[in-house]
Image (cartoon, rainbow, N blue to C red):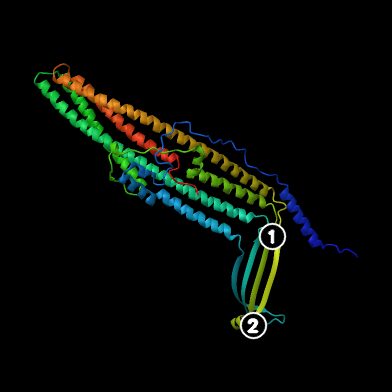
């Protein structure tokens, strides 16, 4: 039996398809870069003793200040950056719907009324009406999974934006908490400066009286006045810092600049220790790490989709049309027209555009991998720095407390010696300066110690757990 030969068109199509498949298979694999990230087994710094375990979502409540709780909650609800982040999530949710829509057939409807005047073969003019009601459907067969990978990339981008919103919320909460604690520290310093100013004013009046009665020299009086003016200058400087801190917090709360309500005083605030856990748990805690991870997933899916562009695409098309010369005919007895077909589009000569596109996607995937590793390293470094700060500032605050107590005793002794005539008034002034410096340093260290706990909460992920 004689074998029938393949028609020319079929042979050309088969050759084209084979050439395209070979072109796609000829593209060498593009594996990700060799990982260089090493997760430590434990923290280098000594961690504080744990009292509450994992970081809770409302970690700022551990400071026990209702005013701080209210500020953080207000910021999480009204902060402009967070509102932008939520709007960006809505954007990427719509992008995901757009990407997933390509997995379904596209259907379009059309209605084309036409009224035309034409010349017949005899030279006469004829007018006619043609009404067409049609529907067209098209569908791309996802033979290689390219459309699915574009959907995966869009889904990963959406998860990355959700993680970015969590990271922004963590940053806003930590910034508000840190700013509030700094504000309470400034309030305590202002109270100390005002009390010191009153004490310096009493000392100035006493020094003037002693000079006028001949019991002391003018030097002691002038020195007391210098100390009083130094204390007076500290008050407006602290008031300016307080106003600026209040305005910064108001901006985070999406409010106009102005004063803020206060809660517990600085000395009544104490952050409980936090268990940092193992370094590996940080990979699931921090939203910025999850964001970087999803960026890698999105870039990897985009690379796979770019490689699939080198393979043929199969498109199916269907159209159906109802045609009539009048609306009555169109509805009751139309002419029915239809067509069904398909097409295979295979890239043959693209000037290297598609291969270059895959190289671009591969480079973006590699950049995402490198960014992920750097994000993780930065996270480890932030936790280590926070642990060091909590430990060191705690030790400093303990020594500062002892220094303030000793300075108070020195002032008491110097004041008794001066009043009993065993020492000059300059000795008491020097003891006053020492005590003020010690008390101010203690207040600054207490505020810094609390802020270091905030930094630790932030570095540990603040309770936002990856799903």
Residue at the spot 14% in from the left edge and 23% down from the top edge: 207
Residue 434 appears in view:
no
Single out the residue that lies furthest toward the top. Answer: 422
Label 1, residues with CA under 10 Å away: few <14, some 14-19, many ≥20: some
Of 321 and 453, nearer the camera is: 453
What count of labels does the image hold?
2
Sequence-first tag of 1 and 2: 1
Single out the residue that lies furthest toward the left. Answer: 213
Label 2, residues with CA under 10 Å away: few <14, some 14-19, many ≥20: few
Tell me the distance, in whole angstroms, between the alpha carbons under discs 1 and 2: 35 Å
Q: Secondary structure at mark 2?
A: loop
Label 1 close to label 2 by CB (< 8 Å):
no
| Residue 162 drawn at (x, y percent) | 48, 50
Single out the residue that lies furthest toward the right. Answer: 1
Q: Could you say which disc has been placed on residue 333 in the image? A: 2
Q: Badge 1 is on which residue?
A: 314
423 vs 9, left or right, is: left
| Quadrant of the rendered image containing residue 334 | bottom right
Residue at the spot 37% in from the left edge and 51% down from the top edge: 78
| Residue 420 drawn at (x, y percent) | 13, 19
| Quadrant of the rendered image containing residue 413 | top left
Work out which quarter of the rendered image holds the N terminus and state it. Answer: bottom right
Q: Could you say which disc has been placed on residue 54 in the image? A: none
Of 225 and 397, nearer the camera is: 397
Residue 263 appears in view:
yes
Up the image or down, 22 lies above or below 278; here it is: below
């Amino acid at each position: 039996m004689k074998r029938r030969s393949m028609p020319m068109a079929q042979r050309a199509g088969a050759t084209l398809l084979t050439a395209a498949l070979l072109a796609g298979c000829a593209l060498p694999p593009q594996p990700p870069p060799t990982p260089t990230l090493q997760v430590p087994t434990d923290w280098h710094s000594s961690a504080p003793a744990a009292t509450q375990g994992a970081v809770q979502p409302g970690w700022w409540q551990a400071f026990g200040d209702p005013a701080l709780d209210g500020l953080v909650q207000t910021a999480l609800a009204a902060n402009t950056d967070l509102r932008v982040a939520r709007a960006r999530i809505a954007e990427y949710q719509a992008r995901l719907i757009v990407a997933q829509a390509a997995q379904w057939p596209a259907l379009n409807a059309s209605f084309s009324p036409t009224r035309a005047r034409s010349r017949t073969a005899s030279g006469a003019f004829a007018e006619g009406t043609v009404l067409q009601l049609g529907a067209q459907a098209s569908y791309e067969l996802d033979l290689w999974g390219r459309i699915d990978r574009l959907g995966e990339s869009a889904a990963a981008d959406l998860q990355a934006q959700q993680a970015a919103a969590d990271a922004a919320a963590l940053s806003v909460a930590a910034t508000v908490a840190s700013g509030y604690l700094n504000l309470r520290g400034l309030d305590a310093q202002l109270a100390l400066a005002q009390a010191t100013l009153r004490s310096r004013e009493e000392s100035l009046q006493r020094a003037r009286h002693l000079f006028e009665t001949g019991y002391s020299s003018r030097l002691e009086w002038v020195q007391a006045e210098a100390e009083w003016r130094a204390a007076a200058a500290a008050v407006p400087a602290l008031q300016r810092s307080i106003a600026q801190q209040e305005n910064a917090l108001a901006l985070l709360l999406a409010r106009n600049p102005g004063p803020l309500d206060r809660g517990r005083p600085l000395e009544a605030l104490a952050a409980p220790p936090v268990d940092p856990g193992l370094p590996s748990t940080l990979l699931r805690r921090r939203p910025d790490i999850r964001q970087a991870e999803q960026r890698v997933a999105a870039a990897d899916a985009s690379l796979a989709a770019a490689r699939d562009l080198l393979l043929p695409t199969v498109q199916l098309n269907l159209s159906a049309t109802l045609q009539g010369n009048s609306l009555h005919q169109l509805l009751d007895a139309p002419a029915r027209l239809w067509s069904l077909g398909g097409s295979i589009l295979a890239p043959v000569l693209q000037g290297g555009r598609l291969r270059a596109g895959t190289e671009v996607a591969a480079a973006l995937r590699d950049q995402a991998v490198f960014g992920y590793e750097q994000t993780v390293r930065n996270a480890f470094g932030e936790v280590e720095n926070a642990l060091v700060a909590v430990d060191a500032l705690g030790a400093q605050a303990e020594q500062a407390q002892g220094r303030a107590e000793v300075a108070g005793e020195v002032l008491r002794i110097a004041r008794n010696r001066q009043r009993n005539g065993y020492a000059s008034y300059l000795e008491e002034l020097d003891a006053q300066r020492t005590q003020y410096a010690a008390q101010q340093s203690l207040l600054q260290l207490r505020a810094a110690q609390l802020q270091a706990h905030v930094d630790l909460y932030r570095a540990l992920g603040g309770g936002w757990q990856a799903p």
